[in-house]
Image (cartoon, rainbow, N blue to C red):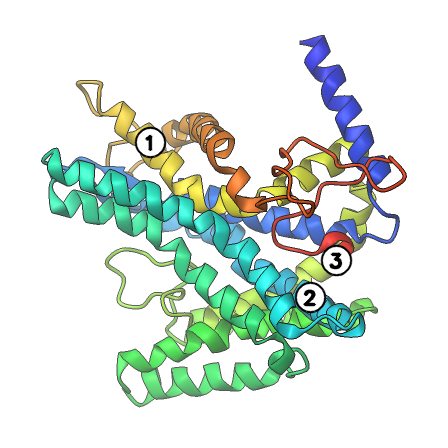
């Protein structure tokens, strides 16, 4: 145990010492928090039950609405788009200054996004065929595939906005916000077709993305603009929920007439704006916290495998749930209907097992995220620290950003 702790301390010191002084570690910390928010949110508000025979999904939010504040804490997608817009704008500008062609730049960034997707699709394609041949009910398989594939919508939107960075990097966030307002007024005020709401999938997430691009240009060098986003977004969200008829949950709730997230509504966009303001305000405390080698090493290594964690966390939860079916009785917090505080307590006890299963997935598939090394060698392990030309240790590169946020 002491030897493992000593090895971790040495690795943390190497990562800390090898990180360029110019690197804004708060950016990595914000992305890590956003990823953890998504993962923990899904693990807490998604339940696979056997109440109707086979497996079906439900949510504790549908039966315990007093848990709604959980959705406010763990719905962190806006922060991810904020960081993504910031890094994409900086990366695009840096590439242009170095004479790198747009095709090369966008190919590198999208490759980092989509390489690990192939592994997920391949494994689940084979598993789906095996389950059908083994007699698994189509409804159960549909439930499982929906959980696995639903996060990919986010990846597609993120990839599209990244590819469009040269066009949208200098777009003022108010313009996509105007589109969101217009769509919701038409959809809810004038009873327009529901399908018009899907325009907000692009416009709604373009708001935090363009806020991130503005951040890269120094728009939030002072605290006042970020504070205005936090206060304005929070007040607007409260008004929309209390008097505008929008749901208070910032994630979809089974059986609800309106989902704030699918597609995004004005309420979730305003809520995300407040989140962005808060994220920008806590950059300095995060930067100070990241000066500690062990804290920084954890954030750096999580960022190195961000896509692996994102793509496989639902599979990890389902694997634990499936193994639990080997027990003759339904396990509390795993297969039972989420309708009581006891379910919540039981669910919390399952989280370490979900994390352990995700660790197994990481060991098996994290290599797909980084691909081959620049010199054609094998991909470096997540715990490795590659030396620079002088032999000094360098910080691990993340899977979704240029080294040093270039």
Place of residue 272 in the rendered image (x, y in percent of width and height, measured from the top left): 55, 65
The residue where tag 2 is placed is: 86
Q: Earlier in the sequence, mark 3 or mark 2?
A: 2
Residue on which the image places disc 1? 319
N-term mark: 1 or 3:
1
The residue carrying pointer 3 sits among few (fewer than 14), some (14 to 19) or many (20 or more) residues within 10 Å by Cα, namely many
Mark 2 secondary-structure assignment: helix
User: Would you identify the image quadrant in which residue 246 lies?
Assistant: bottom left
Mark earlier in primary sequence (1, 2): 2
**Structural distance between the alpha carbons of marks 1 and 3:** 35 Å
* Residue identified by numbered label 3: 405
| Residue 376 falls left or right of residue 124 | right
Say which of 370 and 325 sits in front.
370
Q: CA distance from mark 3 to mark 2?
A: 9 Å
Q: Quadrant of the C terminus?
A: bottom right
Q: Position of residue 391 (x, y in %)?
A: 87, 35
């Amino acid at each position: 145990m002491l030897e493992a702790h000593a090895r971790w301390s040495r690795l943390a010191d190497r990562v800390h010492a090898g990180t360029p002084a110019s690197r804004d570690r708060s950016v990595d910390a914000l992305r890590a928090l956003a990823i953890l928010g998504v993962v923990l949110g899904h693990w807490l508000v998604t339940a696979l039950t056997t109440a109707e025979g086979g497996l079906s999904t439900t949510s504790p939010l549908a039966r315990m609405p007093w848990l709604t504040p959980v959705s406010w804490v763990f719905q962190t997608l806006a922060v991810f788009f904020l960081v993504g817009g910031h890094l994409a704008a900086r990366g695009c500008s840096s590439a242009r200054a170095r004479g790198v062609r747009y095709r090369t730049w966008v190919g590198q960034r999208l490759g980092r996004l989509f390489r690990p997707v192939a592994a997920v699709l391949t494994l689940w394609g084979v598993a789906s065929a095996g389950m059908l041949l083994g007699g698994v009910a189509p409804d159960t398989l549909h439930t499982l595939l929906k959980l696995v594939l639903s996060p990919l919508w986010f990846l597609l939107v993120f990839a599209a906005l990244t590819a469009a960075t040269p066009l949208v990097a200098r777009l003022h966030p108010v313009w996509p916000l105007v589109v969101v307002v217009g769509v919701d007024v038409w959809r809810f005020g004038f009873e327009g077709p529901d399908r018009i709401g899907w325009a907000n999938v692009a416009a709604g997430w373009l708001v935090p993305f363009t806020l991130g691009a503005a951040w890269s240009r120094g728009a939030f060098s002072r605290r006042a603009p970020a504070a205005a986003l936090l206060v304005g977004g929070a007040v607007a969200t409260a008004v929309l929920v209390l008097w505008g008829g929008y749901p208070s949950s910032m994630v979809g709730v089974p059986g609800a007439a309106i989902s704030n997230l699918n597609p995004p509504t004005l309420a979730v966009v305003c809520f995300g704006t407040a989140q962005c303001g808060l994220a920008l305000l806590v950059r300095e405390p995060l930067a100070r916290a990241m000066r500690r080698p062990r804290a920084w090493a954890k954030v750096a290594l999580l960022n190195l495998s961000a896509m692996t964690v994102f793509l496989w966390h639902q599979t990890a939860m389902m694997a634990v749930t499936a193994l639990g079916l080997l027990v003759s009785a339904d396990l509390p917090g795993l297969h039972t209907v989420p309708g009581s505080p006891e379910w919540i307590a039981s669910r919390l006890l399952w989280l370490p097992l979900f994390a352990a299963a995700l660790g197994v997935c990481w060991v098996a598939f994290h290599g797909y995220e980084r691909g081959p090394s620049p010199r054609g060698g094998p991909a470096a392990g997540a715990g490795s620290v590659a030396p620079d030309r002088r032999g000094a240790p360098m910080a691990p590169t993340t899977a979704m950003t240029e080294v040093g946020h270039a």
